[in-house]
Amino acid sequence: MAGFVFKQFCIEQENTAMKVSTDGILLGAWVNLSGVKSMLDIGAGTGLLSLMCKQRAECLAVTAVEIESGAFQDANLNIQNSPWEDDIFVHQSAIQNFQSDIQYDLVISNPPYFNDSLKGPSASRNLARHTDSLSFNALLNEFKRLSHSRSRLAVVLPYQEGTEFIELAQKQDLHLVRKCEVKTTERKAISRLLLEFEYTANSGFVEPEHTLLCIHENGQYSADFIVLCRDFYLKM
């Protein structure tokens, strides 16, 4: 499959099981980078989220962790070919085995979400899509291990799985501070949730910022989607 060309970098994806998706692009464009100096990208895939966030915040120190060898190969190549090859560090490892002296300001992930579902013939695709290697609770535990008291966690998930994730996060003393519900069109049901959490002790229990995004209107990209993503898509 051909690579994906953005305004400031390219994504080669020949070896990865999970190609560039709107989910990842939405999360990379939406996540709040205010006050963030260090970021950990869990399940980095092709390096898309790391590169998007680095483009948005050039002073950001980025660490990316990817378990699957093909995706790790593509992420390495994409980072090396980007303007930020010296500023994004990618490791091949399960996040449970990853060790760091840094407590990250932001942890971001487009995580696997299939649970107890029928698997396909591709082991690498199963690894990327199914929660066997990284359950939601495991992701929350690793966030807590690698963060500090004012850190934030940002994820993108399908609607049902995102609702479950919110409940699990609350049980681990995390508070939802931002939520964006995503529809492909105005008439379609909500298909994705963009979620951002912080530790309950720092949240003040404020109501989360809640927005709704329709990707398409009248057969074209919506104005809101263009505003969110125009720094990345070539034809916006």
Image: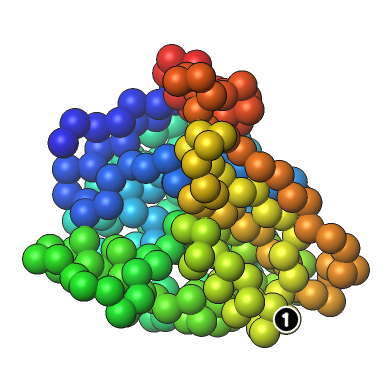
In the image, is residue 223 above or below residue 156? above
The residue lying at 47 percent from left, 58 percent from top is 158
Residue 93 visible to an observer of this rendering = no
Q: How many labels does the image show?
A: 1
Residue 167 lies left or right of residue 173; in this view the side is left
In the image, is residue 162 above or below residue 27? below
Return the residue found at the far bottom.
Answer: 171
User: Who is closer to the viewer here, 13 or 61?
Assistant: 13
User: Who is closer to the viewer here, 83 or 230?
Assistant: 230
Q: Where is residue 205 in the image (x, y as percent from the top left)?
A: 87, 69
Residue 165 lies left or right of residue 10; in this view the side is right
Residue 138 visible to an observer of this rendering = yes
User: Who is closer to the viewer here, 26 or 143?
Assistant: 26
The residue lying at 78 percent from left, 51 percent from top is 209
Q: Position of residue 28 (x, y in %)?
A: 53, 43
Residue 34 lies left or right of residue 92; in this view the side is right
In the image, is residue 153 above or below residue 76? below
Residue 174 position by quadrant: bottom right
Q: Position of residue 10 (x, y in %)?
A: 34, 31
Q: Which colour scheme is used?
A: rainbow
Q: Which residue position is annotated with label 1? A: 173
The residue lying at 30 percent from left, 64 percent from top is 129
User: Who is closer to the viewer here, 210 or 135?
Assistant: 210
- Mark 1 is on which residue type? Asp
Q: Where is residue 223 in the image (x, y as percent from the top left)?
A: 61, 21
Return the residue found at the far top.
Answer: 235
Return the residue found at the far front.
Answer: 187
Residue 29 lies left or right of residue 197; in this view the side is left
Residue 12 position by quadrant: top left
Q: Quadrant of the N terminus?
A: top left
